[in-house]
Structure formats: structure tokens, C-alpha cells
Image (spheres, grey):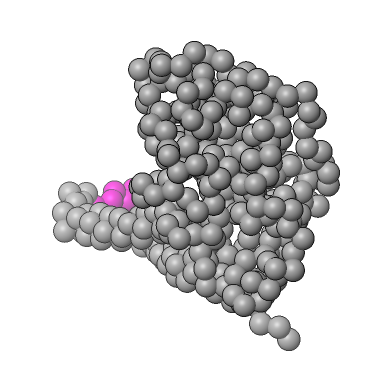
């Protein structure tokens, strides 16, 4: 007979943090609930009225007892709050050396893209012992990326990037679910995460049918849609030079400053929110409806690759731009569009 398993299999570093905290909540809250229930039953029996004319004894109160049942629970629950806050900040702060994987959710499938070019649908291969950061966005409605064995669950939203990270500790095959009702086939939006030993993962990478890196795909789109017509790498174009843009502050014409992260670049491409960059005319057309989320991710990855990595001041080895980096910063977008069709979004 199989033993009763109240929690899923533990297969990530977060499990060792979440599980003790979960059981602490169960024990403490259960003990408090049971204590209150026992006291209520005791009080009903002990202090019940025994005759019609009985008057209860008037009690002025006991400050020691009142202080005890106020201070001790306060300390316990503040301790639980601190424990939970630490766990939350651990989840929200991925290590700097995390391996990044892009995820696009759509009804009703998960599309995953590795930096090196490998693409997966409803499956994800990751190495054991290495932190993995997922950068996720939805193409339609709200979804939720949920891997019970890793103790991770993160909403995936349309029009906004969300992230989650994990580090697998055991090789194996683990269920992937959508934990947010997303339509009639929500129950079929499932998949698998394959945690592999590092050498097996490297072999899988070499055997995969990669169609070029994500940055190289973005470079093709950069030229296909006419971005290079205005964003010149010599620094003399009508729109800002994009080299070294990613992670830098951008001063806009309205006087505000934005950091050129994934969200800002996406907003510029779709022309959703940002004002034009200070010192440049507003030539940027909107590509809303012309680019899929996959293509926007590829363009963003290309822009990352053509300049210094944030905080290093050194050019990225994956970049294809010349080494004489321009001093202009910001993004105004492509100045001319192409009649070429967008990449098909096959399932």
C-alpha cells in the first residue's frame, strides 16, 4: 500500500524552503484553532448558568494573562511573516548567472525558446544544479506557469513580462500545468519539465534542431522590418543608435527617465506608452498586430546582444555590431516598415 503523500515530490531548492514553512503554518494555525475551540467548549461548560437566579461573578480582568495571549502570538506570527518574506524575496531575486529561457503562453500551449535557438512546445529541458530564469508573457489571456515539484507558480500576463526562477535538484520528469482558467481547453494546457544531468543536457543541446540563436533570429527581423533604415550603427541615423542600449537609462522628451529593459523595448516596438527619446523626432511606427510575442522576444534579445552587458561596460561576445559604440542612448524604433510578412505561428 502506498504511503499517504500530502505534498508533491520535492525536486528544487525552493522545496526545502517552502515545505518547512508550509508545515509550520499548518502546525501553528492548527494549534491556535484547536486551542480556541477547546477553550470555548471549556468556558461553555465551566461558566454555564446553573440556576435561573444565578448572577455571574464580576471579574475586573487579569493584565498578565491578557499581555501573555497578546505578546506571544504577536511574536510567533511576526516570526512567520519574516520567514515568509525571506522566502518571497528569494523567489523574486534570480541569481545573476541564471540561464534565461523565454516562455510565450497562448491558448492552449506553452512555447519555450532557449537563447541558443532550441524551441520547445509543452516541454522544457533544463540542467540539474543550475539556476534557470523564465521570462514569460501571454499572447492572449492570463495563464499561470505551475510546476508543483519545483514549488513555483507565476501568472503569465498579456502585455507584460513576468519572471520566475528555480534550480532543479533531481533528474526526472515533472508535470507542468496552467493553473489559471484560460478557456475551454484549459485542462489540456499541460506539459513536462525534464531535469537532466549537465552532461546529458549539453548532449541534448547539440542534438536539438536549433534554427540559429534567438539573437540571430532577432537580427533577421531587425532588417526584415526596416529597423536598420533608421537605427544606424554609425550613430548618424534619424533614430537612436541601439548599441549599448539595454539596461541603460533613457531620457524621454517629456523629461522622464526609463530603464531600457524588456518591458520598455516591447512598449517602444508596439508604441504603447513611451514618449519619444529626447533629441529625436517621433518616427516610430507601431508594430502592434504585425509582430508575434515570439518575434518581439527575438528582437529584444538581439538588442541585448549588440551592446555592453548591464553594469560591465564591455561589449557582448554575441553582438554583431562594430566595436566603436555610439554614445546616443534610447530607442525610437524603426523608421520604415517592410512589406514582408510576419513569421507564421505554427503549432
Q: Nearer the viewer, residue 180 or 343?
A: 343
Q: Which residues are magenta?
A: 52-57
| Residue 217 x, y percent position in the rendering | 68, 44
| Residue 56 magenta-highlighted | yes
| Residue 197 x, y percent position in the rendering | 61, 77
Residue at point 43%, 45% (across, down): 308
Residue at point 68%, 39% (across, down): 220
Picture quadrant where residue 79 is located = bottom left
Q: Main secondary structure of the magenta part?
A: loop
Picture quadrant where residue 229 is located = top right
Residue at point 83%, 47% (across, down): 347
Relative placement, left or right, of 323 versus 105 is: left
Q: Is residue 332 above or below residue 90?
A: above
Residue at point 71%, 32% (across, down): 224
Q: Nearer the viewer, residue 194 or 187?
A: 194
* Count of residue discs: 0
Q: Can residue 22 be seen by looking at this rendering?
A: no
Q: Can residue 260 be seen by looking at this rendering?
A: yes
Relative placement, left or right, of 153 versus 259 is: right
Q: Looking at the rendering, in which quadrant would you find the N terminus?
A: bottom right
Picture quadrant where residue 249 is located = top left
Relative placement, left or right, of 5 versus 35 is: right
Q: Nearer the viewer, residue 144 or 218?
A: 218
Relative placement, left or right, of 137 versus 46 is: right
Q: Is residue 106 above or below residue 273?
A: below
Q: Nearer the viewer, residue 166 or 119?
A: 119
The outermost residue toward the bottom is 1
| Residue 243 magenta-highlighted | no
Q: Is residue 48 above or below residue 181?
A: below
| Residue 101 x, y percent position in the rendering | 60, 54
| Residue 181 x, y percent position in the rendering | 71, 43
Amino acid at each position: 500500500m502506498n504511503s499517504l503523500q500530502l505534498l508533491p515530490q520535492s525536486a528544487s531548492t525552493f522545496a526545502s524552503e517552502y515545505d518547512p514553512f508550509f508545515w509550520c503554518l499548518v502546525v501553528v494555525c492548527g494549534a491556535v484553532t484547536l486551542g480556541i475551540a477547546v477553550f470555548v467548549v471549556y468556558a461553555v461548560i465551566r461558566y454555564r448558568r446553573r440556576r435561573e437566579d444565578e448572577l455571574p461573578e464580576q471579574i475586573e480582568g487579569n493584565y498578565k494573562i491578557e499581555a501573555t495571549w497578546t505578546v506571544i502570538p504577536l511574536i510567533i506570527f511576526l516570526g512567520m511573516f519574516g520567514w515568509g518574506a525571506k522566502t518571497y524575496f528569494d523567489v523574486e531575486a534570480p541569481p545573476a548567472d541564471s540561464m534565461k529561457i523565454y516562455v510565450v503562453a497562448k491558448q492552449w500551449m506553452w512555447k519555450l525558446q532557449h537563447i541558443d535557438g532550441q524551441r520547445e512546445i509543452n516541454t522544457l529541458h533544463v540542467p540539474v544544479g543550475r539556476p534557470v530564469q523564465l521570462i514569460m508573457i501571454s499572447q492572449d489571456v492570463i495563464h499561470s506557469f505551475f510546476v508543483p515539484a519545483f514549488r513555483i507558480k507565476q501568472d503569465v500576463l498579456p502585455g507584460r513580462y513576468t519572471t520566475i526562477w528555480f534550480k532543479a535538484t533531481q533528474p526526472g520528469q515533472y508535470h507542468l500545468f496552467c493553473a489559471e482558467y484560460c478557456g475551454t481547453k484549459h485542462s489540456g494546457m499541460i506539459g513536462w519539465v525534464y531535469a537532466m544531468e549537465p552532461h546529458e543536457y549539453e548532449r541534448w543541446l547539440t542534438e536539438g534542431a536549433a534554427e540559429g540563436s534567438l539573437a540571430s533570429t532577432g537580427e533577421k527581423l531587425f532588417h526584415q522590418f526596416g529597423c536598420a533604415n533608421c537605427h544606424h550603427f554609425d550613430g548618424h541615423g534619424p533614430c537612436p543608435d541601439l548599441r549599448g542600449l539595454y539596461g541603460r537609462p533613457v531620457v524621454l522628451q517629456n523629461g522622464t527617465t526609463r530603464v531600457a529593459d524588456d518591458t520598455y523595448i516591447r512598449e517602444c516596438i508596439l508604441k504603447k506608452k513611451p514618449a519619444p527619446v529626447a533629441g529625436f523626432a517621433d518616427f516610430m511606427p507601431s508594430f502592434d498586430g504585425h509582430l508575434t510575442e515570439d518575434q518581439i522576444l527575438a528582437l529584444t534579445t538581439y538588442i541585448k546582444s549588440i551592446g555592453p552587458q548591464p553594469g560591465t561596460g564591455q561589449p557582448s561576445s554575441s553582438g554583431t555590431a562594430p566595436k566603436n559604440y555610439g554614445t546616443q542612448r534610447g530607442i525610437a524604433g524603426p523608421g520604415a516598415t517592410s512589406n514582408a510578412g510576419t513569421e507564421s505561428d505554427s503549432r
